[in-house]
Image (cartoon, grey):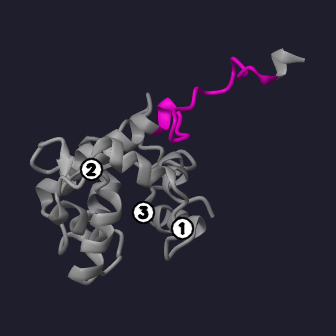
Amino acid sequence: RMAAAMPDAASPSRKPHGLTDAQIKEFKEVFDLMDKDGGGSLSIDEIKQLMDMLGLKMRPDELEEIMADVDLDGSGHVDFEEFLQVMAKPQDLPYKRTDVMRAFNMFTRPDDPAGSIHPQALEEALLKYGGDKFSQNDIVRLVNGLDLTAGGFIEFEKKINLFVNK
């Protein structure tokens, strides 16, 4: 009877915020990409860039409110632990998983494995549709920072599942 309460050895280990080691690793990649100055924390400007990238236009007062909610220690910056606390909460995003999948699938090539995209195709799409929000260097850095499969592809479906639950 007591053995039933013990965690299953096959289940991924979960941390206090409920994220698995694999999820934490993925979020660390995102955090590091957002942390443009490499300071180990996110400034309000870096968070604004993320919101812009996600298509969430925010007024300065809204951004400051978000920052106050996320910046648990009041340092004026969001460190990785604070970032994880936010990412562990269910997100109410203005788009659904199917919308994001459809957008990625528009840029995949016919020979790309299902749920995956070639890094060059992603880079070209980001340059074409996000070049007004991000520099070419930022886009190249983003794409180069993503893990690739043994075949050299980015498994976007797994990354989408991290952020979008619906």
- Which one is closest to the eye, mark 1 or mark 3? 1
Residue type for callout 2: Asp
Whether residues under marks 2 and 1 lie with C-beta atoms below 8 angstroms apart, the answer is no
For residue 154, above or below residue 164 = above
Secondary structure under the numbered disc 3 in the rendered image: helix
Q: Which residue is mark 1?
A: 102
**Which label sits on residue 107?**
3
Residue highlighted by disc 2:
73
Quarter-wise, where is residue 5 in the image? top right
The mark lying in front, picked from 2 and 1, is: 2
Q: Is residue 155 above or below residue 138?
A: above
Looking at the rendering, in which quadrant would you find the C terminus?
Answer: bottom right
What is the C-alpha distance between the residues marked 2 and 3? 41 Å
Mark 2 secondary-structure assignment: loop
Q: Amino acid at mark 1?
A: Arg
Is residue 146 among the parts visible in the rendering? no
- Residues at marks 2 and 1, CA–CA distance in whole angstroms: 39 Å
The earlier-in-sequence mark between 2 and 3 is 2
Residue 45 image offset from top left, x and y in percent: 15, 65
What residue is at 42 percent from the left and 43 percent from the top? 154
Q: Main secondary structure of the magenta part?
A: loop
Q: Nearer the viewer, residue 23 or 73?
A: 73
Q: Are marks 1 and 3 in contact (CB under 8 Å)?
A: no
Residue shown at 32%/47% (left/top)? 30
Query: Which residues fall within the magenta stretch?
Result: 5-23
Inspect this view and state whether residue 123 appears: yes
The residue under label 3 is which amino acid type? Phe
